[in-house]
Image (cartoon, helix red, strand yellow):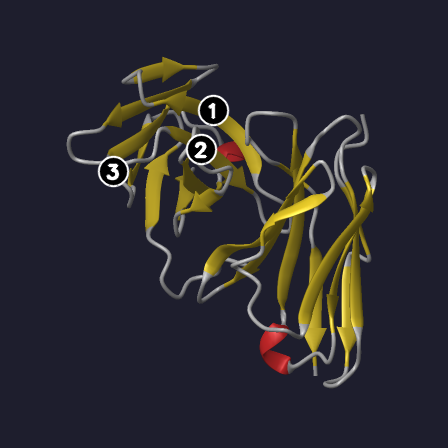
Amino acid sequence: GENVGLHLPTLSVQEGDNSIINCAYSNSASDYFIWYKQESGKGPQFIIDIRSNMDKRQGQRVTVLLNKTVKHLSLQIAATQPGDSAVYFCAENLMNRDDKIIFGKGTRLHILP
Amino acid sequence: DAGVIQSPRHEVTEMGQEVTLRCKPISGHDYLFWYRQTMMRGLELLIYFNNNVPIDDSGMPEDRFSAKMPNASFSTLKIQPSEPRDSAVYFCASSEGLPRPFFGPGTRLTVL
């Protein structure tokens, strides 16, 4: 696939355990953040977003945490399933000044049986 | 809703040839984005449109690349002439209002 190996960090998690994927974003002025999931051979798929006036947001089996002090974003996936195997990207945006969405490098999540 | 539609899904061409990639955004979406994905550089924003008008093309790598959006339901990304280093997966994405792009399936381009 597009993100095979070279410089992509990989997280291996036992099926049923919780996964935590981390992201350090680059611009302290960014005020909107998105997590995407990309399965092999497909386009990135929206998972969850969060604005900078929040530090936590929950979805179905997923939680995003935002720490603006250290410019850190994390995605927590509860009870990881085989279908969660994918590459996960965080993306940032300067919502009130710019419409561009800038993506990070991605993390590969590998589910162990 | 059919989602973002891209064509072709795969394109193999020879160096020097013109390549045209096509995109139909989700109906009602007013933003359209073109991204390129490679192993080495990840997902790069090439250009984006708002209401059919190009807003930022600073990510377009060279003059060999051009993009148009003649109407709200169609956009093209053209490479002329193509080079082997242009080989990548090209994604089109669209969004309504808040820039939260929904991606198409991509076009895998191979330039020999």
The answer to whether B95 is drawn above or below residue A4 in the figure is above
Number of residues whose C-alpha sits closer than 10 Å to that of mark 3, classed few (under 14), some (14–19) or many (20 or more)? few
Residue type at mark 3 is: Ser
Instruction: Determine whether B86 is above or below A64 in the image.
Output: below
Mark closest to the chain's N terminus, 3 or 2: 3
Label 2 is placed on what type of residue? Trp
In the image: residue A108, left or right of residue B71: left
Q: Quadrant of the C terminus of chain A?
A: top left
Closer to the N terminus: mark 1 or mark 3? 3
Residue visible at 37% across and 15% down in the picture: A57
Q: Number of marks in the image?
A: 3
**Chain of the residue where label 1 is placed in the rendered structure:** A
In front: mark 1 or mark 3? Answer: 3
Q: Where is residue A16 in the image (x, y as percent from the top left)?
A: 39, 25
Badge number at residue A48: 1
User: Is residue A78 visible in this depiction of the protein?
Assistant: no
The residue type indicated by label 1 comes to Ile
Is residue A92 placed above or below A81 in the rendered structure?
below
Q: Where is residue A58 in the image (x, y as percent from the top left)?
A: 39, 14
Residue B68 appears in the figure: yes
**Of the pair A28 and A71, the residue shown nearer to us:** A28
Q: Nearer the viewer, mark 3 or mark 2?
A: 3
Left or right for A109, reference B21: left
Residue A13 point in image, percent of width and height: 34, 37
Position of B3 with respect to B64 (left or right) is right
Residue at 78 percent across and 70 percent down: it is B19
> Which residue was labeled with disc 2?
A35
Foreground of the two, B11 or B94: B94
Residue at the disc numbered 3: A28
Query: Given contact means CB atoms under 8 Å apart, are the residues at marks 1 and 2 in contact?
Result: yes
Residue A1 location, quadrant:
bottom right
Per the model, the C-alpha gap separating discs 1 and 2 is 6 Å
